[in-house]
Amino acid sequence: MTRGWDFSLTSGDSALAELIQNLLLFIPLGVSLTLAGVWPRRVIVAGAALSFTVEFLQQWIPGRDPSVGDIVSNTISTALGVLLVVAAPLWLLAPPRRSAWQARFTAIIAVLVWYGTGAMLRQAFPPPPYQFVPRPDLPYFGRYQGEILKITEGIRSVEVLAVAPPYPPGRTSPLIAGLGPHDERVLMLSVEGYDLTLRYYMPALRATLEQPDLRLRGAMKPVAPRDTFIAATRHDSTNICLRVNSTERCHLGYTIGDGWKLIYYPEGRPAWMLGLINLLWIAGCVIGVGYWGARTGGGGGLAIGIVIAGLLMVPLLTGLKATPVHEWIGALGGLGVGWFLGTPGRRPGVSRDFDPGAVARG
């Protein structure tokens, strides 16, 4: 049975995050086909046709709905990929003076993105009263199959006495959800596999971005099926703690490198994988600073200083955790790779003989 088409550009609780995903998704297609010599107009048509085919087939895929907005976003994404290649000589091969300004501008943009990360992830609880619902049945989440025996609420703490289900939940299953006066999900304490997770109200929800969680990893492993256990969370303005029985971890929070999770958050991935993506996110934010800094002929010090100041100051200004070592490595690695690629005499990604006009005329 076919489903109806959605004609809105974007919708849902994560509307902005999904829009950004769609605007990024087809950029590699546009870049690859243009570099392969396909005419720009044909590349854009190919992107639109591929997106239409995917959306059309979703009429018969359970849980998926075809969307005209996705087709529009993917087509724009393909066109952005084409534009990156066609305009590459203008921004990759800029003269030293313009390269210096591009390095500084890129550094400022990176710092603003990091600051925005902190602003979106900070705790922003709506005014009480709150209603705590045990084992809520919420869209996109599992239903906890154990029992909730007691909920104890404090000024800045919540404690749940629960019975473990016959098997660990395969997806995030809330033990309780604290709802605000307008049914806002103020706080959600959940179990996923052997992890205890916490989600709290943040500006990212109002902006329809993703809501990454905080985790006490492996805390449920000692809890056998049908065992009674205590799950709790407490917080103040600078410290968030999670506890299962006697296992507690405090000083939980987010870092600058968690910014990508506002766009796409893969639940349940191992900590090392998420840490690696954080490192790559930071490196990607600053690689342009290194590239254009090198092309200034040694005048990129101010731009690099802006990056370092951002890594130090943004956490202090926004309440994020201090930038960890692996994210510093990502920043230094991104600057280094960019500097290496931008060093005069090295062959850039786009040849000096590349003629964007020839591609466009093709």
Image (spheres, rainbow, N blue to C red):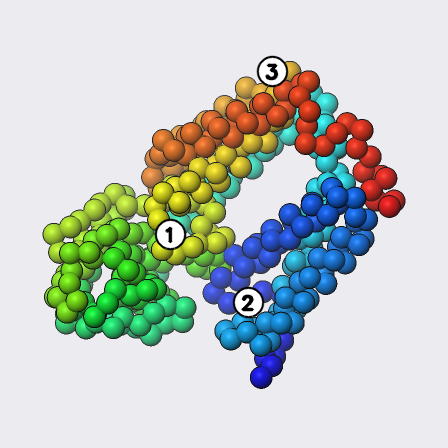
Q: Earlier in the sequence, mark 1 or mark 3?
A: 1
From the image, tell me which residue sits under label 3.
298
> Marks 2 and 1, how far apart in space?
26 Å
Residue 166, image quadrant: bottom left
Q: Residues within 10 Å of mark 3 (few under 14, many from 20)?
A: few
Q: Residues within 10 Å of mark 1 (few under 14, many from 20)?
A: few
- Judged left or right of residue 243, residue 56 is right
Check the image and name the residue furthest to the right. 361
- Residue 269's disc is 1
- Local SS, label 2: loop
Question: In front of the other: label 2 or label 1?
Answer: 1
The vertical placement of 85 against 16, above or below, is above
Q: Position of residue 313 (x, y in %)?
A: 41, 32
Q: Position of residue 115 (x, y in %)?
A: 46, 41
Q: Amino acid at mark 1?
A: Arg
Give the residue at x 65% y 72%.
56
From the image, tell me which residue sits under label 2.
11
Q: Earlier in the sequence, mark 3 or mark 2?
A: 2
Give the residue at x 36% y 55%.
268
Check the image and name the residue furthest to the front. 36
Q: Nearer the viewer, residue 97 or 221?
A: 221
Q: Kindly tell me whether residue 164 is visible in this rendering.
A: yes
- Local SS, label 3: loop
Q: Amino acid at mark 2?
A: Ser
Q: Position of residue 317 (x, y in %)?
A: 39, 37
Q: Nearer the viewer, residue 233 or 347?
A: 347
Give the residue at x 44% y 37%.
279
Q: Kindly tell me whether residue 188 is visible in this rendering.
A: no
